[in-house]
Image (cartoon, coloured by chain):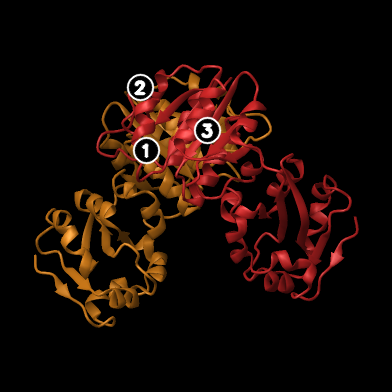
Chain colours: A orange, B red
Amino acid sequence: MQPIPINDPEDPRVAAYRDVRERDLAGRQGRFVAEGKVVLNVLFAARRFEAESVLVLENRLAGLAATLAAAPSDLPVYVASGAVMDAIAGFHIHRGILAIGRKRAPLSVDETLATLPARALVIALVGISNHDNMGAIFRNAAAFGADAALLDDTCCDPLYRKAIRVSVGAVLKVPFTVGGNAQDLAAGLARRGFGQIALSPNGVADIRDIPRSNRMALFLGTEGEGLPAPLLSQLQTARIAMAEGFDSLNVAAASAVALHRLRDG
Amino acid sequence: MQPIPINDPEDPRVAAYRDVRERDLAGRQGRFVAEGKVVLNVLFAARRFEAESVLVLENRLAGLAATLAAAPSDLPVYVASGAVMDAIAGFHIHRGILAIGRKRAPLSVDETLATLPARALVIALVGISNHDNMGAIFRNAAAFGADAALLDDTCCDPLYRKAIRVSVGAVLKVPFTVGGNAQDLAAGLARRGFGQIALSPNGVADIRDIPRSNRMALFLGTEGEGLPAPLLSQLQTARIAMAEGFDSLNVAAASAVALHRLRDG
């Protein structure tokens, strides 16, 4: 692998890195911006994603040798000075490591579920529109060994730059797919034999009393509205018991508590 | 209570709201900026804090009537147009509700612990330097009924504007005090009969196997460094079991899992 020096911020070879903040808007097209060494390691190990190129600060290149050794040998590695890198990206790139990634052919909900083992834990996300929460939920899902994530059409894109960063790369690790509304996800899960739990502040059961079954899905809704009423009336519901007078848990924190309860081992 | 119209951004009566972002730096002086109706409700109910004044967007005043009814009748309530409010604050105030709060006389670690009941749960924070994490940890502490928080000298200020916002006001609800280093906190807790658990990725016990005792303190350290080695060698340590290959949990998520395990009820 021969690093390619970039001296001109307008160099067309680094066009994908131009104005990285604007690029975020293009997330749904299946391309995304990965930042930092930890995320790059996850990207190179991911089966559902591939790197298009890497852009590295010249004084970070040596420290990245082991990471880049895991990349395809024909991956373009662009190297720039701090001034050139910041001029390309449009703001200061603190960590000095960027990559453009690309989604391989996406799987449907059913295809995703079909790949899972007989014992599996899935999260189903409905209306999660905040990128910090999305990233944090994926980080928790990876930490507690969730096998896949299903997203309804109203969720934000996990491949948004900030969501990837907050997830520490977990959005590239936990297989996810976007498909339909909450009812569609529930129907798809039922067809594949998944028991389904809807987490809600008004849930009937305490999450501590929910037994783990072989195939299990946990529905998480947006903080403001919660999960849609038709879904809640259709699924078994569970709550996380809280102190009186401060009945408020961030959805990412709630996912950590619930996934820790339901995980294996 | 008679609202006071403010038409000039330079009006000296709203000097405390000028350039709110800069004001954050003054957090340690015991004054802070609270944002939004939910936080304002917590502030008015807090015993350890008091409001100095409120600055409200004119079209938000009516919706704030019930909240303001809980405030002292001599509290100055300044009312401004959106243009004037943004000019005062130095950026767009989305929610249209700001308040300046003030800490009453702070208590020492020992005074804080002395106020607690025979059965109590305390968090001890060491080196938490990220305001999002600080706010999120307090939100979890309030949700799971923690009775107090002790902070070492290297923690960031929970009264920083963003930490208050992320906590949804919990930093004004869960009593906290800053005192010394991690060893000082441990010594102070021991004197008051608190059993102490240090949460660490390499902890000896699984957090699920830690029995809840009457007086219990949970130590949480920064994500990068973790808790200091001398403290870990001195206390009982506990880990949160995670999936192999992604041994990474945000400290706020870890606090949610551990506090949910240790809480009463």
Residues flagged by tags 1 and 2 on a common chain:
yes
Q: Nearer the viewer, residue B186 or A76?
A: B186
Q: Is residue B5 above or below residue B160?
A: below
Quick check: B178 left or right of A192?
A: right
The secondary structure type at the circle numbered 3 is: strand
Q: Earlier in the sequence, mark 1 or mark 2?
A: 2
Q: Earlier in the sequence, mark 2 or mark 3?
A: 3
Mark drawn on residue B228: 1
Q: Give coordinates of residue B75: x percent, y percent.
A: 84, 54
Q: Nearer the viewer, residue A58 or B155?
A: B155
Q: Nearer the viewer, mark 1 or mark 3?
A: 1
Q: CA distance from mark 2 to mark 3?
A: 18 Å
* Residue under the point 43% across and 40% down: B251
Can you see residue B140? yes
Q: Earlier in the sequence, mark 1 or mark 3?
A: 3
Q: Is residue B9 above or below residue B124?
A: below
Residue type marked 2: Ala
Q: Is residue A72 above or below residue B241?
A: below
Q: Chain of mark 2?
A: B
In the picture, which quadrant includes the N terminus of chain B?
A: bottom right
Residue type marked 3: Ile
Quick check: A43 left or right of B221?
A: left
In the picture, which quadrant includes the C terminus of chain B?
A: top right
Quick check: B118 left or right of B244?
A: right
Q: Give coordinates of residue A98: x percent, y percent.
A: 28, 64
Q: CA distance from mark 1 to mark 2?
A: 18 Å
* Residue under the point 41% across and 24% down: B207
Residue position marked by numbered label 3 in the rendering: B123
Mark drawn on residue B205: 2
Cβ atoms at labels 1 and 2 below 8 Å apart = no
Mark drawn on residue A222: none
Q: Nearer the viewer, residue A64 or B112?
A: B112
